Amino acid sequence: MTAFRPLREDDVPAAHEVSLAAFEDYARRRGDAVPPRPDPRHAHIRLRRFLTADPGGSWVAEEPDGMLSGVGLALLRAGLWGLSLLVVDPARQSDGIGRELLARALAYGEQARGAIILASSDPRALRAYTRAGFTMHPTAAAQGRPRGVVPAPEVRPFEPGDHAMAADVDRAVRGAPHGEDLDVLATQGCRLLAFPDRGYAVLRGGEVKLIAAHDEEAAAALLRTALAQAEGAAVVEWLTGRQQWATDVVVAAGLALEPAGAVFVRGDVGRFLPYLPSGAYL
């Protein structure tokens, strides 16, 4: 019988492998190219961040032979709950493991004032999150090699003194600061940019990982600068209909848009604008 227990330090490598297997199987089922495997060191940092900051929201499913068959990670920041990861080994999907992991993750945030989930387009996930009382906002993703993008002169590398500004922006757009999660992103190979007093961005290679700002003009400037600094092809995700400022920037840069997953929200999550959330830290 499958056992459900808190994530442990010695689970980290196996939990990462379950995540890889689930996402690679999802890509194959959709007929998509299997993406390159990420640097395991970065993935392990993420898992250990949850062990440190959110042990109550970090769960695994363990089989009788000791192998892990599922992982669920949820965070709680100043009254805001978020689902960072929910994966099940392809051989055990539709066996109720994901449902049990989700229930435990949701219980961690039962007193939260607001909640966020970033979902793939897997029909099972969309159904589960809707049944949990979340409102779905379908998204598009943009990718391609940016063309003719000019960085904003006001945007510069993020400095330690920008943390207070970032926290203020986060409270405005999602109701809770990212805090040390931003430092963890930096240790995962990300670069941070700042538009002084108005917003910040997180990017890794060509991937835009997070943008938050007080106003759409600053958010667009941050996104343009991130695209101008992209190493090769760029990827921008979680473009909902409310984030038209971002859609305008990626279209002007020549990136291709295609339907993707969905942003799910419940309760008070701030104005959520202008905001492109982080897949790992929401």
Image (cartoon, helix red, strand yellow):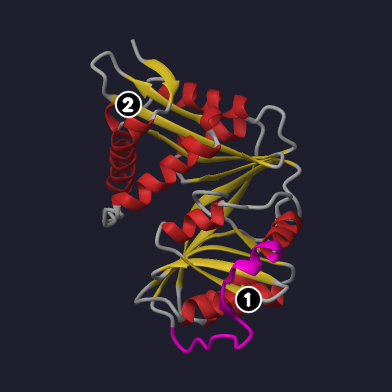
Question: Few, some or many C-alpha atoms within 10 Å of disc 1 (few <14, some 14-19, many ≥20)?
Answer: many
Q: Which residues are the magenta region?
A: 147-165
Determine whether 139 is above or below 17 in the image: below
* Amino acid on which the number 1 mark rests in the picture: Ala
Q: Quadrant of the N terminus?
A: top left
Determine whether 103 is above or below 264 in the image: above
Residue 55 position, x and y percent, is 52, 30
User: Is the residue under label 1 in contact with that under label 2 (CB below 8 Å)?
Assistant: no
The extreme front residue here reads 160
Determine whether 274 is above or below 71 in the image: below
Q: Which mark is residue 69?
A: 2
Q: Residue at x 47, y 43 (%)?
A: 49
Question: Few, some or many C-alpha atoms within 10 Å of disc 2 (few <14, some 14-19, many ≥20)?
Answer: many
* Amino acid on which the number 2 mark rests in the picture: Ser
Viewed as shown, does residue 49 lie left or right of 24?
right
From mark 2 to mark 1, how far is it between C-alphas? 41 Å
Viewed as shown, does residue 86 lie left or right of 56?
left
Mark 1 lies on residue: 220
Viewed as shown, does residue 277 lie left or right of 133?
left
SS label for mark 2: strand
Residue 112 position, x and y percent, is 71, 34
SS label for mark 1: helix
Q: Which mark is residue 228?
A: none
Determine whether 222 is above or below 64 in the image: below
